[in-house]
Amino acid sequence: MISMKKLSLAFGERIILKNVNWLIGERARVGLVGENGAGKTTLLRIIAGELTPDEGSAETGVASIGYLPQDLARLGSGRVMDFLKDSAGLSRLSERLSEAERLISESGERSLELGRYLLDHENIEREFLHLGGYEFEPTARKVLRGLGFESGAGERLCGEFSGGWRMRLALAALLLRNPDILLLDEPTNHLDSESMEWLEGWLRDHRGIMIFVSHDRRFLDKMATEIAEIARGDITRYPMSYEEYIVRRDEERERRERVAAEQRERVDQIQRFVERFRYKASKAAQVQSRIKQLDKMEIYDTDPPSKSVNIRFPEAQRSGYDVMAARRIAKRYGGREIFSLLDLEIYRGQRVALVGVNGAGKSTLLRVISGAEASDEGSVEFGHNVKYAYFSQESAQSLNYAHTVWEEACGTGSAITEAEKRNLLGSFLFSGDDINKPIRVLSGGEKSRVAIFKLLLSDTNFLILDEPTNHLDMKTREIFKRALLRYGGTLLIVSHDRFFLDDLVNRVIEIRDGALYDYPGNYSWFIEKRESLRRLNDGEESAQPKDKSAVEDVSRADSRERRRLEAEERNRIYRERKVFAERIEILEARIKENEERLGKIDADLCMPEVLSDSQRVQSLMIERKILDKTITSDYTRWEELDAEMESVKRRI
């Protein structure tokens, strides 16, 4: 249980918390929400004991507390498994247990101290068992695997891992400690979708209190049974899921605005009466009564109206139907093969999500497609009139560090007005004097936001985006998503934000074990399809029930599931065949048109009046050579498409 009494904290003149009273019961699942800077992280640090309030207290009794901050964790340089054991307190207990065993073995059977040594050993072993000491390593390997680490990660050194993976190790250590109170600040920031789903499953079994801050709406909605909103130094509690809270919050905001409007109208009415009759003796008593009424009136506070910010990309110039084609591409680092012989085609207007576990090769594939890295084999070709832009976490390095934020904003060449630029920068958390900051003094996240801002105003019709939302809060993510939905071009995106992807994409490509798996639909459909296939596989591998009726029920259920999956597969194959048929039809029309033109050129070259004009003959011969080459290339491509369509047919 956590008890907050008259909790207050201010940074200078800025009030973060004011007289907060809050009792958090056992097994509470609290999602902490609020605008950037409202005090979410500050409150977690107070509960964790890292920050002392100006007034009041946050009491947790004897409960153990585990806090996962957003900042990069310091893990030391030792072995991963040793770090996890140290964090759980098992290393110290193991040493004490070994020392107790040594004392017992060295003391004689009749030693007066033997009884005390045995009692010490029993107490230490009880604590060791309570912390899961003998099962710790198998459990630790399970947690590491769930968080996306490869087999054998426990034997590696902590210093070998990058920042995101070190944060995962810190999270693993926290889960293995299993504290009474879990405080998680953006726990999903460095996780892929499969690791997020695993984490959600693990946290559902946590028996203590859990308070978390997250910009992942799916995580909030799945995990929280209560939402606590921090605003203007106060905390408002909503005993409901996050999606229900959104509805309730909007309803309450409308009600407050309605009440405030009615109050303003009443105040104006009283003030008009006072001004009108202030100097009439006959109305003096009534005027004084109304002045006192105004003095006693508590002005109803409302949230300041949020600015409506709409981001629009420049009008995208229409590209050809075939936007990008990757043919049999491969990438290796040293002796490690990331992927090989991959084929991927993207067509105009598609919004494609590239998903997969960390280390599967998503970012590598984007770098190869964008040309930021060369493939070891194969080729990447872009279609007619394609103008692409690539965003990655390294995009911030291309900013001009001698410029200010405002100078970078004005250097985009966009036709939007100065006011619109300022409004848009504000939505990316650059307001007031922030726009005059030099790029060189910005944090990594701030630089990434500037890079995304510049991307929004660039002239493109194909965007390749690698984790563009990492440093955006929920409000800005929503603005950015609306802009992408209105974007007239084509999109290829990697993101761990499942809610962001779900409304945005219409095709999902999963990279798994060096191969690509295509799911024509949104992210939810991909998850449903993947889970259906997983359940089907699990059902085939599980032991059959002994009861005959149960066997028949399972058989019927499996049969229905198989029929449904087969129907889905047929529909998917039909859509694939339709795409191939449309492309073959376009290709055939182009071949026919070019062959007719070739025939016309051959006929012209037989005419005396043409042959007498050497300049025209030369021009026709050049055109004929180009057409002949184009027709040959088109026939080769037609044969490839026809073979691929036949391959699709054979899968029916």
Image (cartoon, rainbow, N blue to C red):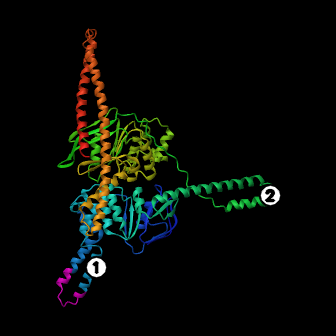
Amino acid type, residue under disc 1 in the picture: Arg
Residue 149 image position (x, y, % from top left):
26, 58
Q: Of residues 522 and 640, which is closer to you in this image?
A: 640
Secondary element under disc 2, as helix, strand or loop, is: helix
Picture quarter with the N terminus:
bottom left
Whether residue 148 is visible to the viewer of this picture, yes or no, is: no
Q: Of residues 169 and 55, which is closer to you in this image?
A: 169
Classify 390 as above or below 266.
above
Classify 367 as above or below 252.
above
- Assess whether residue 349 is covered by the magenta stretch: no
Residue 267 image position (x, y, % from top left):
68, 55
Q: Residues within 10 Å of mark 1 (few under 14, many from 20)?
A: few
- Assess whether residue 109 is covered by the magenta stretch: yes
Secondary element under disc 1, as helix, strand or loop, is: helix
Q: State the residue position of label 2.
A: 283
Residue 547 image position (x, y, % from top left):
27, 69
- The quarter of the picture where residue 582 lies is top left
- The quarter of the picture where residue 318 lies is top left
Q: Residues within 10 Å of mark 2 (few under 14, many from 20)?
A: some
